[in-house]
Amino acid sequence: MPPTRRRYLERLGAAGGVAVASALAGCGENRAERESVTNVRVGSKPFAEQRILGYLAYHRLRDVDGVQAVDEIGYGTSSENWTATAAGVKDVYWEYTGTAWSRLPPRRAERVTDPRRLYERVAADARERGLRMAEPAPFSNEYVLVADRAWSDRTDVTTLSEFATHVADGRTSFGVAVNEDFYHRRDAWRGVLDHYGVSAGTQAELESGGFVVTSVGLTYELVANGDASVASGFATDPQLERESLVVLDDDRTYFLPYQPSPTAHAQTVAANPDVFDALAPVAASLDEATMRRLNRRVLVDGEPPSAVAASHLSGV
C-alpha cells in the first residue's frame, strides 16, 4: 500500500530534523574551533633589524596550531613594546638583554658583561613584571667603535686600550663620528672613555676637533669619505663587512651584551607554550654573520623585511 500523505510528511520531518541537528552540530564544531585559536600580536621596534626579527616570529607563529599571528611589526620604542607586552596589549616581541637591563624597569646600573648571567638577571626581572624572556639568540648587537683600516695600520690602534693610549698622548687631531644615541647615553661614548681612562680634558680635545654627532649609518659614510677615522656602530651592521674597516677590540669588556630574546606576555605563553617552542630554533639560527647578512639584504639591497625573514625560515 502506498504511504499516506501523513506518513510521508512524518518521514520528511524526521529527515529534516536530522539534517538541522547535523548542521547545528557542525556550526558548534566550527565555533569551538574558532574559539580555540588564540590571537598572538607580534610587535617590534621600528628599525630594520627589529623588523626582521619581528617577521621571523610572525611567519613562524603562523604555522603553529591554535595560534593566529597578528602583524603589529614596528609598534614602537623599547619602553612602549615592553609596557604593552607586560599588559597583554601585545603578546610577543624581541628585546635585547642589554636594553632590558639598563633601559627598562627597574633600570639596573650595575654592569654585567657575562652574556649568560645578564640573560638570567633580566629574565628574572621580566618575570616579576608579568613577562617571560625565552633563550636569546647567540649574537649580540652591542655597540662597537670602528676605525678606518689605513688609519689603524698607521697608528697601530686595534683595541680600545690602544685608542685610549693614543689620545692620552695628545694625538687627538683626527675625525670621530658617533650617532646621537651613542653620544648622549651615559653607558656609551663618555662611559667607554671613562672606563678606558681617558680624562675629561682629553675627551674635550677630541670633541673640539673633527667630531661629528650624526644619525645611525652616516657614521660609516663619513669614514668612507675620509671625514672621520673612528666611528660608532653596532656589531651586526652590514657595513662592518667592508675591508676598509676594523672593529676596535673592547679588550677590557666595557659594552654590555645585547642578545635578542623573544619576550612575551606571561599569560600568553602559559596558555600557548608552543609559542616559545616554535621560536627556539629561530633564535638559535641567528649568529652574528647571519644577522649581518639579513640586515644587508634590507638596508643595502632594499628587500622587504618580511620577505627576508620568510626566506631565512625556509632553512630553519
Image (cartoon, helix red, strand yellow):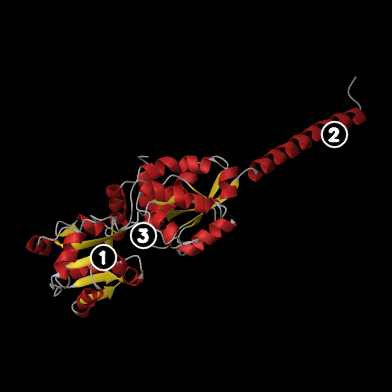
- Between discs 2 and 1, the one toward the N terminus: 2
Q: How far apart are labels 1 and 3 at the CA level?
A: 18 Å
SS class, disc 3: helix
- Image vertical order of residue 23 relative to residue 56, above or below: above
Residue 62 in the image: x percent, y percent? 50, 45
Image disc number at residue 79: none
Q: Nearer the viewer, residue 73 or 283?
A: 283
Residue 127 in the image: x percent, y percent? 54, 50
- Between discs 3 and 2, the one toward the N terminus: 2
Which residue is the site of mark 3? 48
Image disc number at residue 13: 2
Q: Nearer the viewer, residue 127 or 314?
A: 127
Of badges 1 and 3, the one in the foreground is: 1
Asked where in the image residue 170 lies, by quadrant, the reply is bottom left
SS class, disc 1: strand
Q: How far apart are labels 2 and 1 at the CA level?
A: 80 Å
Q: Is residue 22 left or right of residue 214?
A: right
- Between discs 1 and 3, the one toward the N terminus: 3
Image quadrant in which the N terminus is located: top right
Of badges 3 and 2, the one in the foreground is: 3
Q: Nearer the viewer, residue 181 or 298?
A: 181
Image disc number at residue 232: 1
| Cβ–Cβ under 8 Å for marks 1 and 3 | no
